[in-house]
Amino acid sequence: MPLLSAASTSLLNGDLGGLSQTIPKKPRCRGSPVSPRASKDVPYSFRYPAMTKKPKWWWRALACLPYLMPLHETWMYAETAYHLHPFLEDFEFLTYPFLGAIGRLPSWFLMAYFFVAYLGIVRKKEWPHFFRFHVVMGMLLEIALQVIGTVSRWMPLAVYWGKVGMHFWTAVAFAYLFTVLECIRCALAGMYADIPFVCDAAYIQIPYE
């Protein structure tokens, strides 16, 4: 047994040209380890670009246009809310032309709008960052409201059209009207709209510069 163990040890140690000489060894890394670079397309931290001056008035006006779609959708849901309908009736003469024009658009318009706005504006660095941010904010608010409406239709009619649904749509319409109007105010003032969760998602969609 001592002779056998000594022979095996010398074989493994390479004294007899054994196994350790034939097994390839992993090369050692020299120098400091290189950390993987983050993708330039996704920012590693959320921060607004420093604004040294307010955007031009035409960029602030254009930044309000993307919010017309969620405002239209919110207004339609608000008109069905029992508590808000009497209040909104006083403003129908202002909103009916716009709502009627949106309603006459073809069914594929909304899908085409999202593709053109996202690929042609949000992902293009040639447009100002301020404008692209508000474009994607309007798109996200519109998508979120459509998801809420779709999920609500799966509920039983007793809940969707009952007292619970009445209070639910009143709360959703009021919160969305306030949110969209706040975003429009920030766009007109030349600021970024700081809406929790939505602004983070909007910033991530914009290519990092």
Image (cartoon, grey):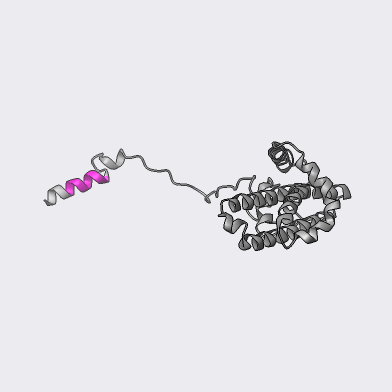
Q: Can you give x and y, in whole percent of width and height, for residue 39 in the image?
A: 61, 45
The answer to whether any part of residue 172 appears in the image is: yes
Identity of the residue drawn at 58% across and 58% down: 159
Quarter assignment of residue 17? top left
Q: Can you give x and y, in whole percent of width and height, for residue 141 in the image?
A: 69, 52
Query: Which residues are drawn in magenta?
Result: 6-13
Q: Describe residue 58's horizontal placement relative to residue 73 as left or right.
A: right
Q: Is residue 109 above or below residue 95?
A: above
Identity of the residue drawn at 61% across and 49% down: 150
Which of 46 and 193 lies nearest the eye of the viewer?
193
Total numbered labels:
0
Which of 175 and 20 lies nearest the eye of the viewer?
175
Which of 84 and 7 lies nearest the eye of the viewer?
84
Q: Describe residue 155's horizontal placement relative to residue 75 as left or right.
A: left
Q: Can you give x and y, in whole percent of width and height, for residue 155 in the image?
A: 56, 54
Identity of the residue drawn at 69% across and 47% down: 206
Q: Main secondary structure of the magenta part?
A: helix
Q: Describe residue 69's horizontal placement relative to residue 8 as left or right.
A: right
Is residue 19 rendered magenta in the image?
no
Q: Is residue 173 above or below residue 36?
A: below
